[in-house]
Amino acid sequence: MKAVCWEGTNDIRVERVPDPMLLNPRDAIVRVTSTAICGSDLHLMDGFIPTMERGDILGHEFMGEVVDVGRGVKNLQKGDRVIVPFPIACGRCYFCTNDMWSACDNSNPQPAKSELLYGYPASALFGYSHMMGGYAGGQAEYVRVPYADVGPFKVPDHLSDEQVLFLTDIFPTGYMAAENCNISRGETVAVWGCGPVGQFAIRSAYLLGAGRVIAIDTVPERLRMAEEAGAETLDSLRDDVFDCLKRMTGGIGPDACIDAVGMEAHGAHIDYWYDKAKTMAFLATDRASALRQAIHCCRKGGTVSIPGVYGGFIDKVPFGAAFSKGLTLKMGQTHVHRYLPKLLRHIDNGDIDPSFVVTHRAPLDEAPRLYKTFRDKKDGCVKVVLKPH
Amino acid sequence: MAATKWATWLPVVAAGAVGAYAVMQRRGHAHRANGRGTGMLADLESDTRQQLGGAAGVHIEEAVTVNRPISEVYRFWRNFENLPRFMNHLESVAQREAGVSHWVAKGPAGTRVEWDARIINEIDDKLIGWQSLEGSMISTAGSVNFRETPRGTEVRVHLQYSPPAGKVGAAIAWLFGEEPSVQIREDLRRFKQLLETGEIPTIHGQPFGGAR
């Protein structure tokens, strides 16, 4: 089959590889009909995530048709149309049974790697480094899905691939980011980053009762997409974000701030260059200018919610501000499984049509070019969907 | 590979849990698993002390919490023939007459290490203790304690072994590797995975790109 492979930093290729096989009783094989490139895949391309190995198959946002199931999978059949959550969860450990699916204790075959870095083993993710399990991802014609009796979620035929594909990651991720803000009706939420996760965070904040959403980015078409959802916007290259937010909220500040940017923040501020120099000299791993700003701007007693991915160490975090204001910080990989029934209902009811975010559609072969287009935010690119068949 | 060497080791353990108790108690060690069963231990203490040469040898303690009922966790472990399923370097365990079992572990370069062990303490859903029979290649003792917690069943392993000199000693050192506790931890992790999910996660056999 064809698959999108990581062959080194800035070296992504489409290659011919063997078809996946069932390896464990609870596995299934899915024929991929649609798969997307995630903003977090760019961290892999850019070499920011350790423990990638040459030849690793990428992709954690995918859906398709079940073509084979192991003897331990009783609730799926060949021909079922499913979306597959990006975290791999066993469904049986303490964490899964307490609705913390992305903290699964058992899914990672190489737990010692993340245990060394984070103290405890991380749950496995599809196509996201060996620290996260080393499972082959879904930017391929076929993919092996472990614990297939737990992860794959059947979707109705009357909804298109593009309407349900983002249930795998970015819609639940944006939704959990908004839910973590604990929004009371009418409150104001500021969102840093208007990429795909930011877009879903904006729409989810409204679904959860926010009165105002203020979206912050530098890319005009992304700000326009935020405006289409009803958000007010700030261009952080032009506007002084802190002053603007304070003025717009009558001196109080946003009730909640969402950092949907993560570890590769770009900015024009002095701390951006400071971070960039440090990461280049291997003195730090992550650039955190969006997070710093979110903490600084949030109102007293407010919440900073962090769906943006961080992998290692950050510094110059304004912890005194966070402490002095009594902020609540919430973060983490999305517990995708938790949100699927509810978010599918929102889609089915027409409360939201997630296909709004798609700007580029292409066959799998074009993945290497589109990774770059997406990273460089060229050609109005917000979200790429690849069609392997 | 280094991480999986371990598996073997537990069988070793299996051979000798109770000895560990005896030694720990004598040294005033705090790791007494359970007050019960000490009457039996007392009978064996002199024997074990001799075998393990007092404070000599290696001691390990590791624990894991399994999200399954205590009786199921206990039963799975008590059936020693299950142990090679999660202890990678253990080839087989065969039950012989009552309380005695034969253990075969993979050694370096295709060699094997074999020994007999007997259960010297056993309390249902609480404790299993073993030690190697006198005259075995290996002198070892171990115990596994089971305890109910709000998070599931806590499984705590104590091991002690004292390899003889010479070739066999080298093979045993190889089995345990440089970090015996790491190998035991990985064995226990597989034990938990197997009991909770019915399988051990793997990526061996999956496709990858050509440059590797």
Image (cartoon, coloured by chain):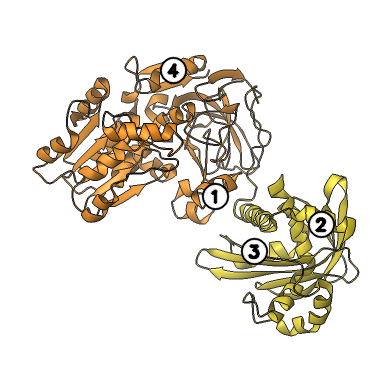
Chain colours: A orange, B yellow
User: Which of pointers 3 and 2 lies earlier in the amino acid sequence?
Assistant: 3
Identified by mark 1, the residue type is Glu
**Point 11% across, 41% down: residue:** A249
Q: Say few, some or many: other residues with alpha carbon within 10 Å of mark 2 (under 14 / 14 to 19 / 20 or more).
A: many
- Marking on residue A32: none
Disc 4 target residue: A370
**Point 65% across, 73% down: residue:** B126
- Determine the chain carrying the residue at label 1: A
Q: Are marks 4 and 3 on the same chain?
A: no
Discs 1, 3 touching: Cβ within 8 Å: no
Q: Image height check: is B74 above or below A226?
A: below
Farthest residue toward the left? A250
- Determine the chain carrying the residue at label 4: A
The secondary structure type at the circle numbered 3 is: helix
Residue in the foreground of this view, choosing between B135 and A243: A243
Q: Are marks 3 and 2 on the same chain?
A: yes
How far separated are the C-alphas under marks 3 and 2?
31 Å
- Determine the chain carrying the residue at label 3: B
Q: Percent position (x, y) of residue B119? A: 79, 72
Q: Percent position (x, y) of residue B172? A: 81, 57
The secondary structure type at the circle numbered 4 is: helix
Discs 3, 2 touching: Cβ within 8 Å: no
Disc 3 target residue: B72
Identified by mark 2, the residue type is Ile
Disc 2 target residue: B172
Q: Nearer the viewer, mark 1 or mark 3?
A: 1
Identified by mark 3, the residue type is Glu
